[in-house]
Amino acid sequence: MLKYVIKRVLMVLPVMIGVSIIVFSLMRVFSPDPAPIVLGQHANEESMQAWREANGLNDPVVTQYFAYISGALKGDLGTSYYTKSAVTDEIFARFPATIELAVAAIVFASIIGIGLGVMAAVKKNSIFDAAGSLFALVGVSIPIFWLGILFIMFFSGFLHWFPSGGRIDVLLKPAEVTGFYMIDALIAGDGEAFSNALNHLILPALALGMYSMAIITRMTRSSMLETLGQDYIRTARAKGITETKVIAKHALRPSLIPVTTVIGLQFGSLLGGALLTESVFSWPGIGKFTVDCILKSDFPVVQGIVLLVAVIFVTINLVADLAYAYLDPRIKYSSKKER
Amino acid sequence: MKRSARFLALMLVFALFTAALAGCAAESDDDATEDTTEATTVDTFTYAQGADPRGLDPALVDDGESSKIIVNIYEGLLKYNEDSTEVEPCLAESWEISDDGLSYTFELKEGVKFHDGTDFNAEAVKFNIDRQLPPLVTEDMGYAGFVFGSVKDVEVVDDYTVKINLTAPNTAFLANLAMSMAAPIVSPTALEAGNNSVMEAPVGTGPYTFVEWNKGENVVLVRNEDYWGEPAKTKNVIFRFIADNSARVLALNNGEVDMIDGIDATVVDQVAEGGDELFEAAGMNVNYMAYNTTTSMFASKEARTAFSQAIDREELVASLYQGYSEVAETILPSFVPGFDDTVKQVSYDEAAAKAGLAAAGITKVHMIAYTNPRPYNAATGVALATAIQGYLQKVGVECTIDTYDWTTYKEKVKGGDYDIAFYGWIGDNGDPDNFLNLLSDPDPSMNIARWQDPTYIAGIKSALELPNGAERDAAYGDLEKYAAEQAIWLPISHAKTLAAYRPQVSGFNYHVTGNVFLKNVVVEAE
């Protein structure tokens, strides 16, 4: 197991180097010069030159890259051109919001998705199956931002059940411990703050989780159908075990193996793909911020975020693989049988 | 494992449901208490804008989103009149200008304290200006050069008297001191603590004190109870950041926020349907078309005049901007000192245009235009250029338009390969020089007409040195007339600023500079 983990962790290195080179070059080749953006209406040739010099943009790109990487290895991702704050501060001020939303979305997507998938498989070809499949098809097809706008118009604008955006009413904000408002509210024992944060979270989490929910439903259904067709299920039924028990005990667990991988991958893409949802719901996360920074040619921030998301993505894949191995006892950790 | 997972899932669902229910219950409780305890006014005012401020250190930012927050936390030596850009005393009670126009002596208000409890005095003024002068000034202080570029040094005469010496007479310097960029006075103690930056921990002398900034979400301010003037009327002020225009309108219509800005004509109906009020403010900007006076085609005044005559600006502005821009007869907006309503641009005359263009032999014109909306031109430069192309077609002139995104466009303007280009200007300090010196600037990226007229340049130089008053105003009026007569630019429009607010809100001052002063804002309870 240890060897397997070490090997997987080492594989992260080339990925990270590749990602850093790609994002570094892309920003410098395709983004407009940051100097006039940062300096504004009164920028002139002289002030822009001084600014570029001060920010190392006159150095050869390779020198810039190595300066950046050596800083990054020490945990210094540089300073935002635009706000002049440390990139790590900028990222961590927003990252908990993105994680909170992604976790809520994946929890919703997993619970509903697995439930619907199991139901569709068990009642194959029934009305439930058709409804589940239709729901999944709609979930995959609807653009998230459009769904988000619909949700806001209906649940917030028309029914007034939920606020139209934001994370919490700021005057209720609990003392910051973890940066996750719901957890912070629980720590502070503040029920009002907790429910207020939850109220803000529900619509964006539903909108963001819809696509993943659909994928999970489909995956669960097909995986479950395959398992239910196995001989040992027939044997279990022949032994007189109740149908509920057969499904819950014998069929569900093995069916969840591929579903777990999908959930892991979906979670990764939720972190990276929350951009539209965050914009629609004014959710103060990292997605919207990234686009703003790309538009402002704020190189250090964009590089920092891409690196961070890459680390998370790679880590999630690793965890999913390990969980996969755990759920399926046939997978051994020896290098021989590794896939 | 499976059991615990199922248990966890059930618990989560349970938690979600109970909390959602609790949320609804808690909210209704809130409303009830508010109704009974707060009979007339609400103690929180929420303002929604499109984005986070860049930062809250007036020396280090240049954007409107920062500026709106900054003016409620800080004050400068001078301030603008509520309805115009004339300057009035603020932290300085009075001032004297030496006869040679090179020294400005300010008598400061006594007993003013910064939010951190330290004293506002002459040393603080010196500290704030010195940090923006060589050798301390840094390359990222975007407005230091503009505001304090003419300052030689600052002398502390006594605790409450400060003397600022200039390198050359510059009356616009007074207007600079009322600006929301570079000029507001920051607590020196806070600057020292923050390593010469208070971007995220602003400390000023203004009616509101900074509480916190939740990035991407909001900035929270609370009333400064020790304010030297009359304290602010509403206790809490929250600036929220909602990027999407229609989401901002929805939040307003829902009552989640009390006032919004940055909206455009497309959401005006939505605001009205929600029972909210619209606020239209004149904007300190100008949207214009410029002839490249260095080309043989437009070197002559007659050719420029004939081209301008082909364009019906009344019709053009009405159709492009749907009533949210005014036709610009002058370069200066009406509230800027020096505005002269007798200035008239070349008027529309299709027949005269046709004859004049034929006489000048103009049949093909090369235009460049920007593709982005700009604060002074929401319709984009391309839309404006295309409309003008249409007018010229009627008089037999073919216009080709090359279009570029804003950043590339600025490079193209600098390159100078055009007969006609489009641009605009957002006023900085409300001084007439700030607009009219564009036409005398030697830098072609500022002066896109590339006009270098000795009479005009001399006029700008002498007007800058005249003391504020009727003589100076008249000098700028004459300069405007001269430029209009020469038909160097064709000013198109002044864009209005649109904001919306709930009917319960009153007392805000949405200033012509685009800043919103919230000291007197009141929100009545529903």
Image (cartoon, helix red, strand yellow):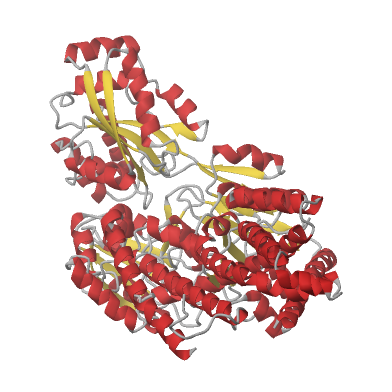
Q: In which quarter of the image is the C terminus of chain B?
A: bottom right
Q: Nearer the viewer, residue A172 or A251?
A: A251
- Residue B85 in the image: state x and y as whole percent: 43, 49
Asked if residue B96 is positioned above or below residue B385 in the image, the reply reads below
Looking at this view, name the residue that lies furthest to the bottom: A2
- Residue A157 in the image: state x and y as whole percent: 72, 49
Asked if residue A283 is positioned above or below residue B268 in the image, the reply reads below
- Residue A147 in view in this figure: yes
Q: Nearer the viewer, residue B77 or B235?
A: B235
Tell me if B385 is positioned left or right of A137 in this view: left
- Residue B503 in the image: state x and y as whole percent: 71, 48
Q: Which residue sits at x=76%, y=79%?
A: B7
Q: Which residue sits at x=21%, y=11%?
A: B358
Q: Which of B374 and B210 is in front in this view?
A: B374
- Residue B171 in view in this figure: no
Tell me if B28 is positioned left or right of A325 in this view: right
Tell me if A5 is positioned left or right of B167 in this view: right
Tell me if B188 is positioned left or right of A39 in this view: right
Q: Nearer the viewer, residue B33 or B436?
A: B33
Among the 4 quarters of the image, the one containing residue B10:
bottom right
- Residue B69 in the image: state x and y as whole percent: 50, 63
Q: Which residue sits at x=60%, y=47%?
A: B246
Q: Quadrant of the N terminus of chain B?
A: bottom right
